[in-house]
Amino acid sequence: MKTDDLIAALSADTMAEAAPEQRVLPWLLPAVLVSLAGLLLTLGARPDLAQALTSFVPAMRHVLTLSLFGLALAAALSMTRPDGRARLWPLALVAAVALALLIWAYASTPADGRMMALQGKSYNICIITIPILSILPVAALFMALRSGATTAPTLAGALIGLAGGGAGAAVYAIHCVESSPMFYVTWYGLAIFAVSAISAVIGRRILRW
Amino acid sequence: MTGTDDDWAALLRAGMAGDARAYRAFLQAISPVIRGIVRARGRALGEAQCEDVVQDVLLAIHAKRHTWRQDAPARPWVYAITRHKVIDAFRARGAGIELPVEDFGDVLEAPAGVDPTERGDMEKLIGMLDDRSAGIVRLIGFEGATTAETGAQLGMTEGAVRVALHRALKALAVLRERHVE
């Protein structure tokens, strides 16, 4: 086939597709709502949620997970452009705040209470439930963004995992009664990291073009 | 360089709004530039194989045109896709290359060679499509038929031809990716 013939065939196709960011909401919104409904119908919201949102340290669970979700989503979106670059420092900032909270909690917890603060009563439920709640948001983001043209599929996949994992953790935080940063930075962090690592592997495969 | 960046962006913008003629002009304007980049980077491949890579890049640009931000300049976007596909293509053919994107600024345009750029790779891929899709791509590509003429010949509505062509070209881009791996 001559290049001019190819150009003739290509230029006859005038059907435009939606830009990747226009595809995000229709996929992501239902996914997050289903995860949220799943949590509310099974584990349920913590009874004193409103009160927990008003005190700084427990409320930071919601702030950190929601900021991670938003910032990772923005970074993943900018990577759908072949000439786009993801800004990663806002994500590092979230990690730094989480780490600072962890250190503060470690220092302010008496030595004999640290193990209890770390394990809480529900670490095993936490590290299983967050990845489960993340499955739909991550899948929705892959569906929406696979039409993109990232030049770094592994990193883009990891960012999708951070966004989806952040969404899953933010949903889980509605149920979670553990208020020590030693608990939530550790276990939320591990769960989100695992989701992100798996998503990086998936991204490497399905975001290629 | 063929035209300024504004020219490319204006043509691509019009093309994405449905102006097939502007879109064709865009593809014709970028082809010599892409060819120049590919040939400058891939001397080891020879002129004919280079043209396969040029066609790869054009197909990728077509398949991913919705990732261009319409208020952004077109040239960095075209270069980014070219760079990505050229690296892929050379890697697949076993020839490693270094391709700093900033070098593209002073690349020379290359016209199509004496061999009238008749290339086999794309033809092979088209052969992997189902018969009707392959027929549509060939009628429009080789014989220069319009979508309306193609529809009349195949007993389809023009709208159905458009949809089938769109799907066929998307399928080609996916096949291309698998084929290159």
Image (cartoon, coloured by chain):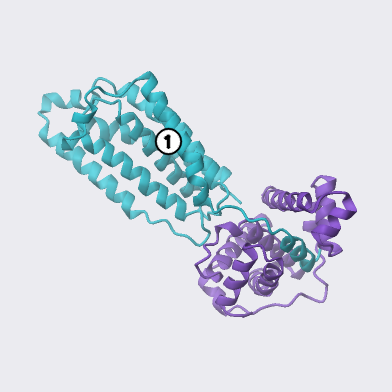
Element at label 1? helix
Chain B takes which shade in the image?
A: purple
Residue A126 falls in image quadrant: top left
Rendered residue at 82%/58% (across/down):
B148
Is residue B158 depicted above or below B118 in this figure? above
Residue A86: x and y in percent read 42, 56
Q: Position of residue A159 (x, y in %)?
A: 43, 46
Q: Which percent across, then down, holds residue A177?
A: 24, 25
| Chain colored cyan | A
Image quarter of residue B50? bottom right
Report the residue marked by disc 1: A195
Of A109 and B72, nearer the camera is: B72
Q: Residue furthest right?
A: B153
Front position in the image: A88 or A29: A29
Q: Is residue B175 left or right of residue A61?
A: right
Q: Is residue A23 left or right of residue A37?
A: right
